[in-house]
């Protein structure tokens, strides 16, 4: 098979949509495999674990041995990291590892195998692979909320109740539009308790918030969830930043004593690049420009959230195309190694600048950064470590969709 008719292409996509319509989530991998088979392909889904270290295969009932793929050391991992298909071979048949995306959110990869002689450089084949993989990604995302199947596959360990509460509040970890990429990540994935972030993009404005609740227990996750809920409520009422911060204050005060959080609440005008923000007792965000951290954003300061009458005028920073705003919690820079040495701001800046020099996309920058923080503390964090990147008018927005099929392996 060296070409693909329009009728055959439509049959495959119709099979996928019709088969998935009433399929239970755990039956979805089999539906995907059956749809792939209409063109003589085989397909298997691999989801990335929440720690973003391994790609975990989902069973399809074919009795095949399931092998986990290392994100940092395999062709499958290369496809995930680069958001680009990677070509290989299996049993004399062409094999392709294709990024599995929901929009621009990286869910994992899909392994596709083809009949011998298939021309993977054919325009029709390239388009069909792209349509098929994108549709599979959307189906996985659509079915995830009402099943634990995909969630359990992605867990590397047992989550705490506090962590379940935080993860239930989070938006997708990455979003992109023509002028902006927002990407966030938090660790430890199974024990995170007090850190939480949120965003929304509408009417030419991107809203963002990060909160770090006091403590590191179930009470902390409740505080973080309340702060996030109040932020969303203020945002949806079209309140300005000061009013939204006051709403968070009032919500935490109403909840009870010792209910405090630090946080950064901000927004970016996507046309002008004006970043306005309020900093409530939080670490100053960093500004990455032309691959270098040029300053910390120290304005808009007020006392931490949870106190009455602490309004402040938001600060403004006028971004330049390609700028990246980095918002992070103290668990990043205060992670300690066995010698009690902090990870520190210098290491954070060095990693950000190295990632920029290597032209890494925001979610891959965060993956590498958080893993370095974990490694510094021997894999066991004493506090939540979270980072959010906002890249304005950078090349990243155009690079967040899977590229075409490569002409050779690697």
Image (cartoon, rainbow, N blue to C red):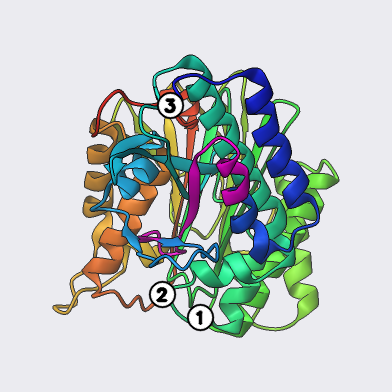
Residue 51 belongs to the span the image colors magenta: yes
Find disc 1 in the rendering and name its residue.
216
| Percent coordinates x, y for residue 111 in the rendering | 43, 46
Query: Pointer 1: residues within 10 angstroms few (<14), some, or many (20+)?
Result: some
For the residues labelled 2 and 1, say whether their Cβ atoms are less than 8 Å apart: yes
> What is the C-alpha distance between the residues marked 3 and 1?
41 Å
| Percent coordinates x, y for residue 344 in the rendering | 25, 60
Name the mark on residue 247.
none
Residue 189 belongs to the span the image colors magenta: no
> What is the C-alpha distance between the residues marked 2 and 1?
7 Å
| Percent coordinates x, y for residue 215 in the rendering | 52, 80
Does the image show residue 75? Answer: yes
| Percent coordinates x, y for residue 5 in the rendering | 60, 19
| Residue range corresponding to the magenta coloring | 33-55
Find disc 2 in the rendering and name its residue.
383
Find disc 3 in the rendering and name its residue.
403
């Amino acid at each position: 098979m060296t070409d693909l008719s329009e009728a055959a292409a439509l049959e495959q996509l119709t099979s996928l949509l019709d088969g998935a319509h009433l399929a239970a989530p755990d039956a979805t991998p089999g539906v995907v495999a059956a749809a792939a088979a209409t063109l003589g392909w085989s397909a298997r889904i691999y989801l990335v674990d929440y720690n973003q270290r391994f790609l975990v295969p989902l069973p399809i009932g074919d009795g095949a041995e399931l092998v986990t793929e290392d994100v940092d050391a395999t062709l499958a991992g290369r496809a995930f990291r680069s958001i680009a298909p990677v070509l290989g071979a299996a049993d004399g048949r062409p094999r392709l590892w294709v990024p599995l995306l929901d929009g621009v959110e990286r869910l994992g990869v899909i392994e596709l195998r083809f009949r011998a002689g298939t021309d993977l450089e054919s325009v029709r084949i390239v388009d069909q692979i792209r349509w098929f993989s994108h549709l599979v990604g959307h189906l996985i995302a659509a079915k995830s909320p009402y099943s634990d199947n995909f969630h359990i596959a992605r867990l590397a360990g047992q989550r705490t109740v506090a962590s379940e509460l935080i993860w239930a509040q989070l938006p997708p970890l990455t979003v992109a539009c023509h002028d902006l990429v927002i990407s966030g990540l938090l660790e430890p994935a199974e024990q995170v308790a007090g850190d939480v972030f949120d965003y929304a993009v509408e009417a030419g404005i991107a809203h963002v918030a990060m909160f770090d609740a006091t403590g590191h227990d179930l009470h902390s996750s409740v505080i973080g969830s309340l702060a996030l809920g109040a932020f969303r409520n203020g945002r949806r009422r079209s309140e300005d930043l000061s009013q939204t911060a006051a709403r968070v204050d009032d919500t935490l005060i109403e909840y009870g004593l010792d209910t405090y959080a630090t946080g950064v609440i901000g927004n970016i005008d996507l046309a002008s690049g004006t970043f306005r923000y309020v900093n409530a007792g939080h670490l100053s965000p960093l500004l990455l420009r032309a691959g270098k951290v040029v300053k910390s954003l120290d304005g808009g300061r007020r006392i931490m959230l949870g106190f009455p009458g602490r309004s402040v005028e938001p600060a403004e920073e006028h971004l330049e195309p390609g700028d990246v705003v980095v918002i992070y919690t103290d668990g990043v820079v205060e992670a300690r190694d066995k010698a009690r040495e902090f990870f520190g701001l210098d290491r954070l800046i060095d990693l950000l600048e190295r990632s920029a020099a290597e032209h890494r996309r925001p979610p891959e920058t965060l993956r590498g950064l958080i893993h370095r923080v974990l490694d510094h503390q021997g894999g066991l964090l004493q506090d939540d470590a979270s980072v959010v990147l906002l890249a304005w008018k950078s090349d990243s927005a155009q690079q967040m969709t899977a590229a075409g099929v490569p002409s050779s392996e690697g």
